[in-house]
């Protein structure tokens, strides 16, 4: 039976019925809740003007808080959760963060300011603000078109110097309220000709999706949200997989890490960083905080984008994808999942359950690097990931994977063949680089020309050889994000 959406908005319980399931949280806040402080800038999760703070039970009596983009999140995702907006932050007068923004002259036109405030506030509560660079990392998903970043960073540093209040008692009370609102059954909402279902277990998801293979799966809506806000597509049935507990686990075992499909990028980042520092650095540059807080590992793979950052990085490691349809489960090498542009090896009613990532052996060397126009929060022009296995000083096995070079994430077979059976030196790197022209004929688009992409890919192979030869220190310290 269809239910209303029950959640807590700025401390008050709310119930929604009658609004289409694809109504965004931002539209609800501004048009129905009378809370215009949250702004619409890009409507695609890039600018951060719409940032709000979500809280949900963490399973151990407390809360898990995360900043998200309200412009691409759908209102049924609020069920059993709490949301705070900039109005709530200032309910008793200026919050210390808001005061710091004023004192540091960190607001100019003011349009982006609520998003910056909520993003910094969420990062402060979760202990992510430690130094100047950490503040910059935190606000990488927020754009200020007045170019007022310096004072904003200063305001963030002022807040970072303040002790985080002890809210454990309040958090426990709120978590208890949210557990009661969420209930223990699959949530089902219908309105305006659309339906939203949120199963709680993989068996429920399998049965539901097998019966409605025409439904769209959604987790963080960092991709599907744009289908509505930008493409104005009609999505009559949506299945929310973010509540499926079986898909939210991370298991680290001997020689591999098992990451559930509904694990967010932020949750997966520290585990991937343990595999190799380059994976951690790639995740640091993976969109902005708000997107990493919502987008999922399974979603980034299942959408089949040729420029997704994760697939090449995991293909190089030899990752396997676990899929399920009804009672049938199977696994495939991740590289075989991508058939052609817009086509994946996934049957109707079949969903991605997890990805299994091998860890490195002592005789293996790994490299991953993202090239984009902007350093932070940008789409790759070229994403490269390499894995070499050595025996007696020569390359016995090689995996060179690229994104942005073809219609799918793809290995470079000719370049790989040029490396096998010989030492990995500058001459070998040059031969592999020259062979890339046999593997790829990249497109020219707004991000890069074909010639640029090919040259960058060649030089990344050479860079890998130089790094192995010279053994330089890590390019960026990861301690601040993954501690």
Image (cartoon, rainbow, N blue to C red):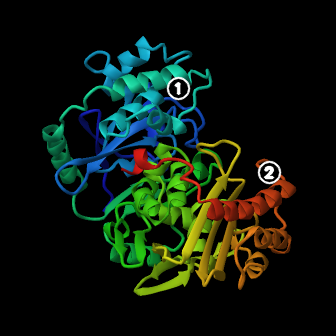
Q: Is residue 101 above or below residue 470?
A: above
Identify the residue at horizontal 57%, vertical 71% (top origin): 365
Q: Is residue 240 visible?
A: no
User: How many numbered marks are there?
Assistant: 2
- Of discs 2 and 1, which sits in the foreground? 2
Residue 128 or residue 301, whichever sits in front: 128
Q: Secondary structure at mark 2?
A: loop
From the viewer's perspective, is 426 left or right of 48? Answer: right
Corner quadrant of residue 342: bottom right
Residue identifier under label 1: 112
Q: Of 10 and 97, which appears nearest the observer?
A: 97
Q: Earlier in the sequence, mark 2 or mark 1?
A: 1
In the rendering, at what x and y percent does residue 65 appear?
A: 32, 44
Describe residue 301's horizontal placement relative to residue 240 as left or right.
Answer: right
Q: Name the residue beneath numbered marker 2.
A: 448
Examine the rendered structure and indicate whether residue 233 appears above or below residue 392.
above
Residue at the location (59% across, 55% down)?
472
Residue at 52% across, 63% down: 299
């Amino acid at each position: 039976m269809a239910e209303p959406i029950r959640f807590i908005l700025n401390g008050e319980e709310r119930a929604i019925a009658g609004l289409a399931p694809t109504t965004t949280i931002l539209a609800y806040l501004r048009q129905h809740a009378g809370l215009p402080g949250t702004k619409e800038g890009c409507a695609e999760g890039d600018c951060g003007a719409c940032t709000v703070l979500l809280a949900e039970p963490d399973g151990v009596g407390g809360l898990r808080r995360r900043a998200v983009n309200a412009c691409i999140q759908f209102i049924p995702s609020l069920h059993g959760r709490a949301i705070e907006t900039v109005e709530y932050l200032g309910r008793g007068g200026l919050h210390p963060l808001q005061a710091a923004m004023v004192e540091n002259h960190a607001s100019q036109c003011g349009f982006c300011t609520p998003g910056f405030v909520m993003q910094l506030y969420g990062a402060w509560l979760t202990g992510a603000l430690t130094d100047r660079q950490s503040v910059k990392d935190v606000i990488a998903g927020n754009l200020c078109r007045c170019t007022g970043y310096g004072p904003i960073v200063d305001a963030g540093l002022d807040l970072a110097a303040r002790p985080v209040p002890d809210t454990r008692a309040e958090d426990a009370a709120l978590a208890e309220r949210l557990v009661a609102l969420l209930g223990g059954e699959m949530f089902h909402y219908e309105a305006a000709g659309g339906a939203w279902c949120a199963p709680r277990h993989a068996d429920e998801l399998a049965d539901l999706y097998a019966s409605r293979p025409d439904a769209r799966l959604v987790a963080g809506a960092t991709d599907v949200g744009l289908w509505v806000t930008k493409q104005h597509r009609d999505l009559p049935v949506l299945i929310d997989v973010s509540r499926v507990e079986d898909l939210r686990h991370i298991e680290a075992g001997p020689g591999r890490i098992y990451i559930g499909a509904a694990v967010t990028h932020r949750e997966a980042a520290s585990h991937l960083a343990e595999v190799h520092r380059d994976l951690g650095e790639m995740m640091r540059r993976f969109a902005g905080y708000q997107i990493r807080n919502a987008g999922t590992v399974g979603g980034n793979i299942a959408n089949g984008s040729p420029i997704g950052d994760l697939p090449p990085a995991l293909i190089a490691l030899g990752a396997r994808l676990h899929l399920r349809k009804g009672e049938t489960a199977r696994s495939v090498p991740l590289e075989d999942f991508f058939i052609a542009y817009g086509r994946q090896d996934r049957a109707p009613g079949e969903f991605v359950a997890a990805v299994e990532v091998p860890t490195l052996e002592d005789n293996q060397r790994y490299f991953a690097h993202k090239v984009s126009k902007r350093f932070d929060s940008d789409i790759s022009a070229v994403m490269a990931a390499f894995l070499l296995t050595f025996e007696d000083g020569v390359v016995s096995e090689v995996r060179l994977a690229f994104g942005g070079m073809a219609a799918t994430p793809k290995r470079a077979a000719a370049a790989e063949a040029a490396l096998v059976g010989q030492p990995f030196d500058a001459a070998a790197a040059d031969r592999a680089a020259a062979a890339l022209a046999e593997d790829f004929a990249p497109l020219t688009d707004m991000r890069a020309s074909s010639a640029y992409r090919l040259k960058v890919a060649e030089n990344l192979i050479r860079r890998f050889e130089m790094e192995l030869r010279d053994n330089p220190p890590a390019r960026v310290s990861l301690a601040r994000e993954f501690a």
